[in-house]
Amino acid sequence: MKLVDQISFNWQIFQRHGLRTFLLLLAVGIGVASVILLTSLGEGARRYVDREFSALGNRVLIVLPGCSETSGGAPPIYGSVPRDLTLEDAYTLEKIPGVLAVAPIVAGTTTVAVDSRSREVITLGSNQSFFTVRKLAVGAGQILPARTREDAMAVCVLGVKLKRELFGNARALGEWVRVGDRRMRVVSVLEERGESLGLDMRDILLIPVRTAEQLFNSPSLFRIMLDIAPSADSDLIQTKIKAVITERHEGEEDVTVISQDSMLAAFNSILTTLTLVIAAIASISLLVAGILIMNISLISVSQRRKEIGLLEAIGASSRQIRQLFLGESLLLVSLGSVAGILFAYSLIAFFSSLWPSFPLMPPLWAVPAAVGVAFFSGLTFSIVPAKRAAGLDPVLALRGVQE
Amino acid sequence: MIKLTSINKTYQIGDTPLRALRDVSLNIDSGEYLSVMGPSGSGKSTLLNMIGLLDRPDSGSYLFDNVATEALKEERRARLRGENIGFIFQSFHLINRLTAFENVELPLILTEQPIKSRRQAVAEVLDMVGLSARASHKPNQLSGGQLQRVAIARAIVMRPRLLLADEPTGNLDSASGSEVIEVIERLNRDGITLVVVTHDQNLGDRATRHIRMVDGQIDSDQR
């Protein structure tokens, strides 16, 4: 039987059983569409994170106190270590070639108050470089003065949300706020900007690094962020940073250096794995569609016994009968896949127009994988019905006898 | 053309084995017109299915054109059947979703004939059975006699040399029945070998060779 004849033969069956065919197409279509749509969500998240990191634009290294042993485990983010990472350590790193800016960060929480209004906020102590490294800008006023590099000045910068909560719509610039037991003058308010690297920059208080040391009564840095030149060799600089700190810490390598690239790579691998898992879960619906096809095919075989007997009488071999039934499922899966792909892409286009900021898009492998699983499932579950059809005894089949 | 020697066939129905054919031997020459008659369960249809290569004997040999068919693979038997043997059934066995034309075309499609020669062959045989005007009708738009003539057209579209008819007039009124008989007898006159299984004495008598079966055996064979 030629392919075109077989397709038209199968097509006539589909026309004859319009509703049944439509429902099977729906099952396959939904399966394929769900794989494509769900993986687009995962891939979209990956692209989103990717874009967030790229928005920082520069190449950032982060030095954390403490060192993960070769035995593994995550670097301690809030852990305590025998030897503190100090401001002096940070400023020594500025001498390494290729390092453009070093932002030491002291972190803690303090109570900020204006009159009777007070708020508990995350407080970061740093210097001018912090604005460079984190690509921050202030809406009004000035960034921290250059002197804050060494001096414990009583000035602060407010996050947008913090400013609104403390001052409302009133002017904050030049006003005094109480931070813990000190009074500080507001020199600027940060420009509105969303979450960045997991920290809501709208809800923080930024003060000079020396002031923070005094406020928290500790010389220990939370971390150091470095901006390195685009042409610099990141690995080489990381090695040098470790060497410098090790020398300063009496021969003990007790810091961890992570790069933005490696963080990005980690996120990438997490989200890619997540997308694969989602795809696997979505594929279950395709297996269900396959079982549905098997069910319907088995019914169809027993309904069409006489036809099968007749086909054998007019010269069809068992192989041809088997092909006919397998072909029916394959045609169904093909049509269902096309419908599913069209449906998924139109839905993606629709949601992309609703939320242009989220890069919803299926990964390259999603369509082939969805269609592949659909065909695998359709074919696997059609083998049994097709075999049953091919194995019918033509004499009994012609009489319509159930064996 | 057909040489059956000591054919045996037993069906298992429930616990009791049913001997449908016992030691049946039969020779049929090209161009003969046979009728096979006998009571129900005498093995007439089994004999017909055996000749038509739809069934395999438990023992015995069947030479079709000097080819030993018992040894052939299923696929080879299917081809032999498709190319040389046409079937006509009591209940027509037309596919309802296909038009008369498409029903007749099926054997040609199965053997992958080119579309052009297919159309020509179908048009020819439909003309032969007098149904050219009904080519695009579906089975539910045709009368019983017309349905059987479509089935005949399908049976002869491959130009077989053997035509097997199982109660071809069983579901027809006498007028339609005679039309159908007329068509198949004309085919016989043109050289096709015709074997008709029937209960109808009048139909049986028209053949030139009469076989009577009882209990799976050939009781009489008269020319």
Image (cartoon, grey):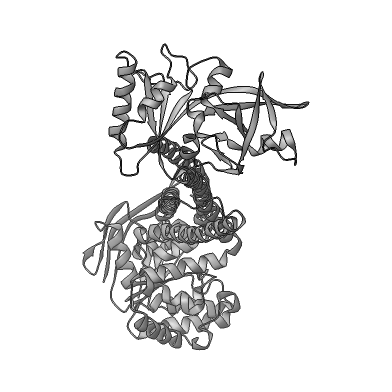
Front-most of A69 and B139?
Answer: A69
Q: Position of residue B142 (x, y in %)?
A: 58, 79
Vertical order, A275 against A241 (above or below): below
* One can see residue B127 in this view: yes
Vertical order, B140 against A217 (above or below): below
| Quadrant the N terminus of chain A occupies | bottom left
Front-most of B159 and B27?
Answer: B159
Q: Residue at x 52, y 74 (%)?
A: B169
Check the image and name the residue furthest to the left: B66
Left or right of residue A259, residue B61 in this image: left
Count the marks: how many?
Answer: 0
Q: Position of residue B72 (x, y in %)?
A: 25, 58
Question: Would you identify the image quadrant in which residue A60 lies?
Answer: top left
Front-most of B59 and A343?
Answer: A343
* One can see residue B197 in this view: no
Check the image and name the residue furthest to the right: A116
Left or right of residue B131, residue B62 in this image: left
Vertical order, A138 against B52 (above or below): above
Question: Would you identify the image quadrant in which residue A233 lies?
Answer: top left
Front-most of A330 and A81?
Answer: A81
Vertical order, B223 against B217 (above or below): below
Q: Residue at x 41, y 13 (%)?
A: A83
Q: Residue at x 27, y 55 (%)?
A: B60
Q: Position of residue A87 (x, y in %)?
A: 44, 22
Left or right of residue A77, residue B116 in this image: left
Q: Position of residue A302 (x, y in %)?
A: 51, 54
